[in-house]
Amino acid sequence: MYRILRGLIALVCAVSCFLPFEKTEAADPYSVIYSDVSAYNGNPVECDWITNAILYASGLYGVDAYLITAVMETESHFNLNAGSPVGAIGLMQLMPGTASSLGVDPYDPLGNVLGGVVYLRTQLDNFAGWGDYAVTDAVAAYNAGPQAVYDYSGVPPYAETRDYVVKVNNAYVNLVNMSY
């Protein structure tokens, strides 16, 4: 029985290689990101600005635009005036000390985005040699700070950071799926 089933599977696989398939075109990054931003922010002018800022920062610093979008979605839900109880500011939720060290004004929307992407780029570079989970560790460092990731040799056991990493991953996967 097993041989028959295996033979049928092989036959189906062989035939399917010759069947015509519909080629679909991937959605352009602007449309994917704009769609995601507009799900949280109902202002079309702000959605366009945020989308263009993400694409600009992505090109400038060589960071995946969907990763930037996923981080921003998780941090602020694309709210230009977002703030946190611990003092994080803006779209990328920069702490004042981090913004100062990066030389950006966290209250300036473009400065906030560029500063956040520089900080993310720094974390990606810091953990680039950490193997299969390097991006995960970089995202954790964006949230908890790089020292915590070094101290725990990976994502620290903080519930907030673990939840954050999962949210960024889910947002990223959603963006990738929207692009096809």
Image: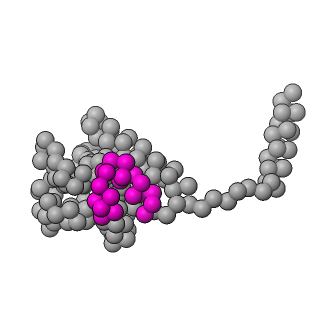
* Viewer-closest of 110 and 4: 110
58 and 90: which one is in front? Answer: 90
| Position in image of residue 19 (x %, y %) | 80, 54
Residue 24 is situated, as x and y percent measured from the top left of the image, at 63, 59
Q: Residue at x 16, y 44 (%)?
A: 84
Image side of residue 170 versus residue 17, left or right = left
What type of secondary structure mainly makes up the magenta span?
Answer: helix
Q: Which residue is at a point 33% across and 58% down the rendered structure image?
A: 44
Residue 43: in magenta span? yes
Which residue is farthest bottom? 60
In the displayed structure, 8 sits above or below 42; it is: above
Q: Quadrant of residue 96?
A: bottom left
Residue appearing at x 42%, y 54% in the figure: 35
**Residue sitting nearer the eye, 71 or 79:** 79
| Quadrant of the snapshot with the N terminus | top right
Question: Residue 25, relative to residue 136: is it above or below?
Answer: below
Q: Residue at x 14, y 67 (%)?
A: 103
Tell me if residue 22 can be seen.
yes
Front residue of this view, candidates 95 and 46:
46
Which stretch appears magenta? Answer: 30-50
> In the rendered view, how is the structure colored?
one colour
Asked whether 161 falls inside the magenta stretch, the response is no
Residue 58 visible in rendering: no
Q: Quadrant of residue 52?
A: bottom left
Q: Answer above or below: position of 161 versus 54.
A: above
Name the image quarter holding the C terminus: bottom right
Q: Position of residue 165 (x, y in %)?
A: 35, 43
Where's residue 16, x and y in %?
79, 50
